[in-house]
Amino acid sequence: MTPLSAALPSEAPNRPEAPNRPEAPNRPEAPNRPGRSEMEERIRSLDWSKTPIGPPENWPEALKTMVRILLANRFPMLLWWGPEYISIYNDAYIPILGQKHPWGLGKPVRECWSEIWDILKPLIDSPFLGEPATWSEDIELILNRAGFMEETHFTIAYSPVPDETAPRGIGGVLATVHEITAKIVGQRRGILLRELASAVEARTADEACLNATAKLAARAKDIPFALIYLYRDDCTAALVASSGIEDGASIAPASIRIDDDSALWPLREAQVTGQMQIVQLTSRCGPIPKGPESGGGPTDPGAPVS
């Protein structure tokens, strides 16, 4: 492996060695200094000669400086270097990568984030080609970082990194990233709850159910499908309203006997226990309805019954 002594913090900067003290070898297998981060270790140990940016001893000073800044920062940061946009990131960025870590280190962004490359490319090209830096307060991206496609939201800033040795004077692009998925989704679902509260203001129970599914249909990102059953006097439950489901779908029987233990939806358990029941659907019903741009969600999703 190629040592990164020129690119990363030295073992003991500006400190004289004790007399006759042997100097520690400057290579990855040398003892770790206290406090060295995971990404500093990974960057040191990676064989960069197999990447388009080459071994660290040939890196320009601009790249070495940016790596130091990156590793010292506690905010999620990602550096795309060179025309191939090779990925170098810090510890704070690891959760954003999910299962792509540590594989994504040293990879071109078109490989690391292949599912959103069509979106990222113009945003990265702009600062790299000398145009204004790009910024978005809330960019929605459908990522595959946990084995399935998921909706995510970020505040991003992509800035050019000057490099006198680069053809256009710009060596790469620095991405400063803040994930706001929980905030955006939480706000949206809070609005849905308020809308559902107003939907119950109806003359009949059936009408309230229809009002509720109308609200749910407009929020398919959060509730891809919904079925509302009302208990009847003959120990059955009748489907009175639905959203995201085609008429006649096997997943939405028109009537369910409450005492039928083989029924898809365990209504009796929900009624007796007063607790939500989770039903695994894929093995029982095949493909299930999905929200727009959901990408499919987990491979074995469950649906709550309450």
Image: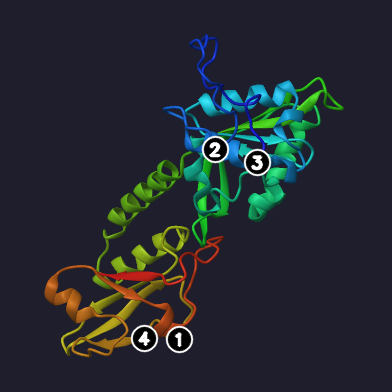
Whole-percent x, y for residue 171 in the image = 76, 28
* Residue density around tag 2, few if under 14, some if 14–19, many if 20 or more, within 10 Å: few
Circle nearer the N terminus (3, 2): 3
- The residue singled out by tag 4 in the image is 253
Q: Residue at x 70, y 26 (%)?
A: 63
CA gap, disc 1 and disc 2: 65 Å
Residue type at mark 4 is Pro
Q: In which quadrant of the rendered view does residue 303 lie?
A: bottom left
Circle nearer the N terminus (1, 4): 1
Whole-percent x, y for residue 228 in the image = 31, 73
| SS type, badge 2 | loop
Question: Of discs 1 and 2, which sits in the foreground?
Answer: 2
Residue extending farthest to the left is: 272
| SS type, badge 1 | loop
- The residue singled out by tag 3 in the image is 1
| SS type, badge 4 | loop
Residue type at mark 3 is Met
Question: Of discs 4 and 2, which sits in the foreground?
Answer: 2
Circle nearer the N terminus (1, 3): 3
Q: In which quadrant of the rendered view does residue 270 lie?
A: bottom left
Mark carried by residue 29: 2
Residue type at mark 2 is Glu
* Residue density around tag 1, few if under 14, some if 14–19, many if 20 or more, within 10 Å: few
Circle nearer the N terminus (1, 2): 2
- The residue singled out by tag 1 in the image is 248
Q: How many numbered marks appear? A: 4
